[in-house]
Amino acid sequence: MNQEEQALLKELSEVPGAPGSEGAVRDVIARRLRPFTDIRTDRLGSIVCVKEGTKDGPRVMLPAHMDEIAFMVSAITKKGFIRFAPLGGWWSQVMLAQKVRIETSRGPVVGITCSVPPHVLPKEEREKPAQIENMRVDVGAFSDREASGRFGIRPGDPITPVFDFEVMRNGKLLLAKAWDDRVGCALLIHVLERLRKQTHPNTVFGVGTVQEEVGVRGAKTSAHVVNPDVCIVLEVGIADDVPGLKDEEKMGKLGGGPQITVADHGMIPNRKLRDLAIEVARRKKIPVQFQLLMGGATDGMAVHIHQAGVPTLYLGVPCRYIHSHAGIIHADDYDRTLELLLALLRRLDAKTVRDLAP
């Protein structure tokens, strides 16, 4: 991974992008791709970047969702603390004492999720997991009037984690927030930039989708804009090479290469497209991993049943600790995923895509 690629990953990971408030991410994608792609949007806010290749070639959709798991202000207490609702699948045990940022009409307001010191908790309370509905954000206000009138906080304002991008000590591991799915957004940009100087037998639609974490909503609307013949979902995978899990249950590790998902909660991928990806990886000597992810879904859930059906594959960059304030990816996994995507796109000509049908 070169410095430019690393800089893009840093920029994408650090900007806020709660579901329904993905504008900052969309701006990064548009700035990079506007010079050489035709850019469109749907009415929910997804961005569609069109890179033409061979005339009348198949329409290839590459969706990557711009939103991250986040929160929304639901109310302000009389003492100035912020009540909130989760946007996406949070686990309560990772949420206490974390720095967050509220995006208001007057600018960002920094806060921290409240936690009670163990010194003042009864023993039975210390052993209980905290409940999300009981949590609050402390923004340094002493009244609801100060929080709303002076700080400009309103119900409906998005709240996102704050976490700085870091290159870890070994130089290959990248620690940041929102890899799910800013890593996919980075792949979308880099794939289209590489295709600028390459021939490809198709028209590629790089799509930054909105509101994936709350029901793959942008994937539904943007699929109507694209009307794809084939789809490759750009996502994170789950690197479960961490303490607490049995070795025989682990399916992904950092440095092990791209993850091909054989099924998830929302989609059984097209087997012929899966086999093509495996063949391409073998020829390019790219290691791949496989995962079965029945506890989650991606934009592919909506795209693969668009109209008469779209052959779809979910390709992921392994990531530790997704759906928390920060995660870790491996630079080599990113590079290999990018290489596999480019090689696969060069194979998706009209005949190959026609032959993907059952």
Image (tube, rainbow, N blue to C red):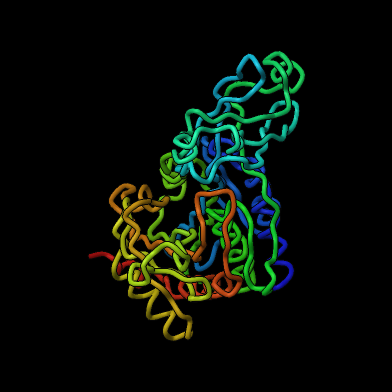
Say if 18 sits above or below 253 in the image.
above
Residue 282, horizontal then vertical, whole percent: 42, 84
Identify which residue is drawn at 42% across, 62% down: 244
Position of the C terminus, as image quadrant, is bottom left
> Depth check: 75 or 59 in front?
75
> Depth check: 306 or 155 in front?
155
Identify which residue is drawn at 51% across, 57% down: 321
Task: Name the side, left or right, on which 279 lies relative to 335.
Answer: left
Total marks shown come to: 0
> Depth check: 147 or 265 in front?
147
Say if 339 sits above or below 8 in the image.
below
Say which quarter of the image contains residue 8.
bottom right
Identify which residue is drawn at 44% across, 38% down: 128
Position of the N terminus, as image quadrant, is bottom right
Residue 221, horizontal then vertical, whole percent: 44, 41
Q: Is residue 1 visible?
A: no
> Depth check: 332 or 352 in front?
332
Q: Is residue 112 visible?
A: yes
